[in-house]
Image (cartoon, rainbow, N blue to C red):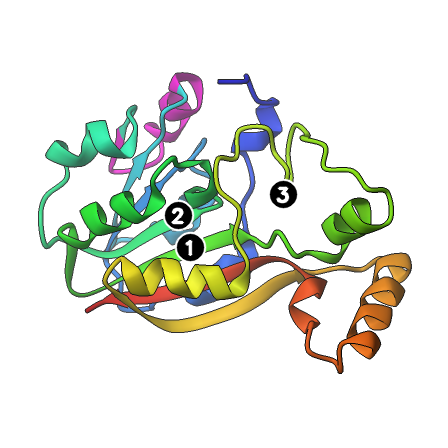
């Protein structure tokens, strides 16, 4: 796998905090990086775990969190207690997995009865991406972003819903996040929406945030 820039593992992702239930006390973040996001969830009555396959990032996270497993989801599964976590977080993780539906099914057994999955997932229909494909006629992999060279899967809002439903979850909330601030891409999105009867507002969002409970 390509070695990522150090900043790749350091995002605080504050826009995802509102999706974490206030009642969640036992929390697992998969792909926790250096622990900057889930560090924000630590309090006297929370127990925050992490899974991180990058050894350097995992070592830093282990100094902050209750427990960090320097493994992949599949390798770490046997060390995760069943029916335990109130929230399992996957911020920009599912697109890196070969078979994300299998991993979501595996994680169901690790959730408590009222536990939820929280995920942020890149939107392949994001207007900047569409511009490069439709106008520049180019699909070029990059070091980060939607066309990150380590992404195996690509999702739209509709396919995100299908992914969770087929994996045995009920989506409680799904919302576009990180809306484009570019005037150029806003105008291009407006043009597309005019042409298609304003049915493509999803193109304005870089990612979708999801909270889902198990069936």
Kindly indicate the quadrant of the structure image that contains residue 50: top left
**How many C-alpha atoms fall within 10 Å of the one at disc 3: few (<14), some, or many (≥20)?**
many
**How many C-alpha atoms fall within 10 Å of the one at disc 1: few (<14), some, or many (≥20)?**
many
203 or 75, which is in the foreground?
203
Residue sitting at 33 percent across and 68 percent down? 22
- Residue 42, image x and y in percent? 34, 49
Q: Nearer the viewer, mark 3 or mark 1?
A: 3
Q: Which tag, 2 or 1, sits closer to the chain's start?
A: 2
Kindly indicate the quadrant of the structure image that contains residue 56: top left
Image disc number at residue 39? none
Q: Is residue 113 left or right of residue 20?
A: left
- Residue 82, image x and y in percent? 9, 48
Q: Tags 2 and 1 in contact by the CB under 8 Å rule? A: yes
> Whole-Å distance between the Cαs marked 3 and 1?
15 Å
Q: Which tag, 3 or 2, sits closer to the chain's start?
A: 2
Region of the chain picked out in magenta, as a range: 55-68
> Whole-Å distance between the Cαs marked 2 and 1?
5 Å
Q: Tags 3 and 2 in contact by the CB under 8 Å rule? A: no
Residue sitting at 35 percent across and 44 percent down? 100
In this picture, is 70 found above or below 206? above
Give the residue pinned by disc 2: 90
Give the residue pinned by disc 1: 119
- Residue 112, image x and y in percent? 14, 60
Give the residue pinned by disc 3: 146
Q: Is residue 105 magenta?
A: no
Q: Is residue 1 left or right of residue 135?
A: left
> Whole-Å distance between the Cαs marked 3 and 2?
16 Å
């Amino acid at each position: 796998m390509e070695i990522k820039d150090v900043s790749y593992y350091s995002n605080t992702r504050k826009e995802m905090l509102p999706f974490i239930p206030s009642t969640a006390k036992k929390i697992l973040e998969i792909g926790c990086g250096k622990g900057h996001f889930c560090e924000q969830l630590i309090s006297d009555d929370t127990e925050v775990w992490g899974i991180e396959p990058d050894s350097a990032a995992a070592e830093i996270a282990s100094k902050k969190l209750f427990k960090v497993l320097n493994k992949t989801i599949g390798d770490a599964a046997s060390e995760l207690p069943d029916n335990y976590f109130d929230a399992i977080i996957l911020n920009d993780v599912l697109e890196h997995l070969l078979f994300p539906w299998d991993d979501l099914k595996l994680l169901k057994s690790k959730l408590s009865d009222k536990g939820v999955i929280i995920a942020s997932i890149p939107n392949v229909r994001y207007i900047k991406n569409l511009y490069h494909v439709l106008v520049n006629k180019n699909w070029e992999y990059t070091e980060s972003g939607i066309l990150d060279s380590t992404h195996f899967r690509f999702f739209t809002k509709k396919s995100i819903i299908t992914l969770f439903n087929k994996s045995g979850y009920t989506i409680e909330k799904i919302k576009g996040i990180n809306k484009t601030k570019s005037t150029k891409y806003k105008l291009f999105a407006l043009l597309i929406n005019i042409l298609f009867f304003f049915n493509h507002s999803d193109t304005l969002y870089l990612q979708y945030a999801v909270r889902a409970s198990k069936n």
